[in-house]
Image (spheres, grey):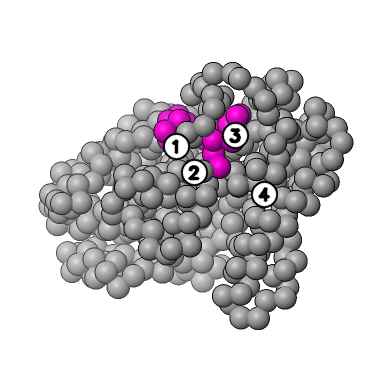
Amino acid sequence: MRIVVLGHPQYFGSHSMNRFAAMVAQGMADRGHEVFLWSPEPMLQRLAIGRASRKWLGYLDQYLLFPLLVRWRLRGDRAGTLVVLADHALAMWLHFLRGYPHAIHSHDFTPLRALAGELPQMELSRAATRVYQRMIRASLGLGRYFIAVSHQTARDLGRFHGGSPFQCSVVYNGLNYPYCPLDAATAVERLRSAGHTAIGTGALLHVGGNDWYKNRRGVLAMYIAYCRMSHQDQPIRPLWMIGAPPTDALRALGAQAEAAGGQVHWLSGLDTGCVHAAYALASVLLFPSQAEGFGWPIIEAMACGTPVLTVDRDPMREVAGGVAQLVPPMDDADVEGWAARCAPTLAAMLEWSAEERAQVVQQSLQHAARFSAEQALDQYERLYQVALRSGVATSHASAST
């Protein structure tokens, strides 16, 4: 096959999406296909004076000049070339790609759900963000062949597509970093070498940013409730919060936890190797997200042999595959009550016998093995071949999720 992978511009810093596009391109090249990886380059943006003009000229590069350049480069053999959009957020380019077989990877519809009022706690405050999401939704209907990262993402696509019949297959993400169990000495040394000295084994762990749906507030509320429980047989475990620096409100919750006998460590700027080490040292990953497209930390932790506590809501429940401990989704109107109901589940996980924990670790490792990059790439290759053969640019196939 001749495959053209289109990705986000490097200059806007979509690092995870850029890594995904590069993984797809390299994986298809390794399988013997002719592959091109194209993404917008700063052209008009180079003329910018000031931050505002840099942003808006970058948009012109991304949404006007680049798709015109792609269409010029693609002139000729339409039937023999498959265009792969690395993210459905790039669907605006489909206006310029009419007539070309294509496949579109769909990752996360959380912003579109917020725009539709489904997540009232998540406010899209910037006018430019709202316009951007409306443009994405208006363009999705031009797509005919999609690959979603979860069944939840596929269901969201079905609600937001709004166009002619389309096809959608689900392929779970493949880990693009070799997460695996690490011995404690290696993991501790890796973190201490990076300047993190207050490190040991057995901590509770959360990985995520300050976005509402990552629910750091809920993590800290659950930890406070856990700290306030009776701890006769074992000391209170510390909590490591990996991600963005905390807001003032989160720091205040951290102070409440410390007043209750806990310890909260904020770990920002860790590279992937250090995150790997933190997973390997942790006793439990706390991941009570309110919404996700997939939920990477669940599988990353399991691949390191770390038990997971997450919420009984898709896609977290779906991705966890019956291996994680589930608690109800957080009630924003009763955060403390929710945390008090969840804390015993966490405490019970920490009281597992060595045999019980070993069984969960083994189940976690077996489940995580299903999420290999090679398996995902094999499935992408098969679906790309189907998309190219069926000529989905003009397909009338019925929707399938």
The earlier-in-sequence mark between 3 and 2 is 2
The residue closer to the viewer here, 25 or 104, is 104
Question: Which residue carries the number 1 mark?
Answer: 160
Q: Check disc 2 and report the residue beneath it.
A: 137
Relative placement, left or right, of 378 versus 370 is right
Q: What is the C-alpha distance between the residues marked 4 and 2?
A: 18 Å
Secondary element type, mark 1: helix
Residue 228 appears left or right of 121: left
Span shown in magenta: 139-159
Residue 156 lies within the magenta run: yes
Q: Position of residue 124 (x, y in %)?
A: 38, 58
Q: Which of 358 and 386 is in front in this view?
A: 386
Q: If you read the primary sequence from the N terminus, does the residue marked by circle 4 or circle 1 appear first?
A: 4
Q: Which mark is residue 272?
A: none
Mark 3 vs mark 4, foreground winner is: 3
State the CA–CA distance, disc 3 to disc 4: 16 Å
Cβ–Cβ under 8 Å for marks 2 and 1: yes
Q: Is mark 4 on a helix, strand or loop?
A: loop
Amino acid type shown at disc 1:
Phe
Residue 232 visible from this viewpoint: no
Q: How far is disc 3 from disc 2 in space, using C-alphas?
A: 11 Å
Q: What is the CA distance from the residue labelled 3 to the residue labelled 1?
A: 12 Å
User: In terms of sequence position, does the residue under pointer 3 or pointer 1 come before the other?
Assistant: 3
Which is more N-terminal, label 4 or label 3?
4
* Mark whose residue sits in front, 4 or 2: 2
The quadrant in which the N terminus is found is top right
Residue linked to disc 4: 7
